[in-house]
Amino acid sequence: MDLLTDDYFFKGKLSIKQNKSGYRFSIDSVLLASHVKASAGNKILDIGTGCGIISLILAYQNPEIKIYGIEVQKSLADIAVMNVKNNGMEEQIGIICTDLKNLKKSMIFGSPDIIVCNPPYRKANSGRVNPDNQRALARHEIMISLPGIFESAKSLLDISGKFIMIYPSERIADIIEHMRFSGIEPKYFRFIYSKNNSESKLVIVEGIKGGKAGAKVASPLVIYKDDGSYTDEVENMFIP
């Protein structure tokens, strides 16, 4: 295993190890986790969990939920298992190292109530592919594509199950197309901006399987103030 670094959340109450080199999570994961509204007893499926960042945040904030983190890369899955153990969350979080295409409901003991996903953003044949294999698989649609994600979501979710993701704003048409093709109706959009007056780079989208047409567009989420510090809303995402 490569050299690991330690990151801390919620005033040091949650510790997360990740590779010093190779793929490292970004604030995208924190933004996405903050928009998942879970209830006691919910089962959550975290697709492409990486080092487990989203699963760990959700488990910390919701002690009465069960989470399954799916990760195809064994090197990342091993770190996720370590993070779960180090934070004493073995009863809440299960890490499964498998290709999403091979995941069956029986492997997570039935349908999830919520699927959360921070998928690779770039098409397999677009742009420069990182020579680091771990980063390449996490950023490009090499092992999994957007249609593949929704195909799996369609088979895993029951009616009224939720799907929540973060993705580049420029691909919002692709999201809507593939969601509806999979029977998941887009219900919520929130566009994310680095700073005021900048263009939106990311969007958080929530859909409901079998939901009725009609969506809400929430107020913009701005990450940074003009001085480069986090806005109050983003800063509060790190507070327990």
Image (cartoon, grey):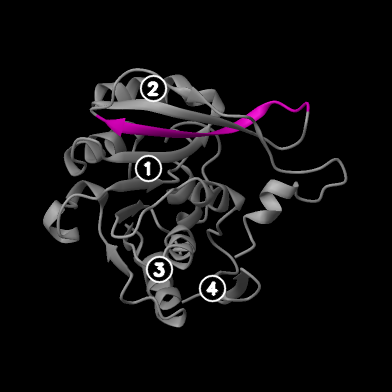
Disc 2 marks a residue whose amino acid type is Ile
Q: Quadrant of the C terminus?
A: bottom right
First in sequence, mark 4 or 1: give its number. Answer: 4
Which residue ends up furthest to the front in the rendered image? 40
Q: Which residue is mark 3?
A: 63
Q: Is residue 57 above or below residue 35?
A: below
Q: Is-magenta flag for residue 200?
A: yes
For residue 193, side relative to residue 148 (left or right): right
Q: CA distance from mark 2 to mark 1?
A: 21 Å
Q: CA distance from mark 2 to mark 4?
A: 34 Å
For residue 120, side relative to residue 34 (left or right): left
First in sequence, mark 1 or 3: give its number. Answer: 3
Q: CA distance from mark 4 to mark 1?
A: 25 Å
- The answer to whether marks 1 and 3 mark residues whose Cβ atoms lie closer than 8 Å is no
How packed is label 1: few (under 14 Cα within 10 Å), some, or many (20 or more)?
some
Disc 4 marks a residue whose amino acid type is Lys
Q: Which residue is mark 4?
A: 17
| Viewer-closest of 168 and 61 | 61
Can you see residue 181? yes
| Region rendered in magenta | 197-209
Which of the labelled discs sits on residue 176, or is there none? Answer: 2
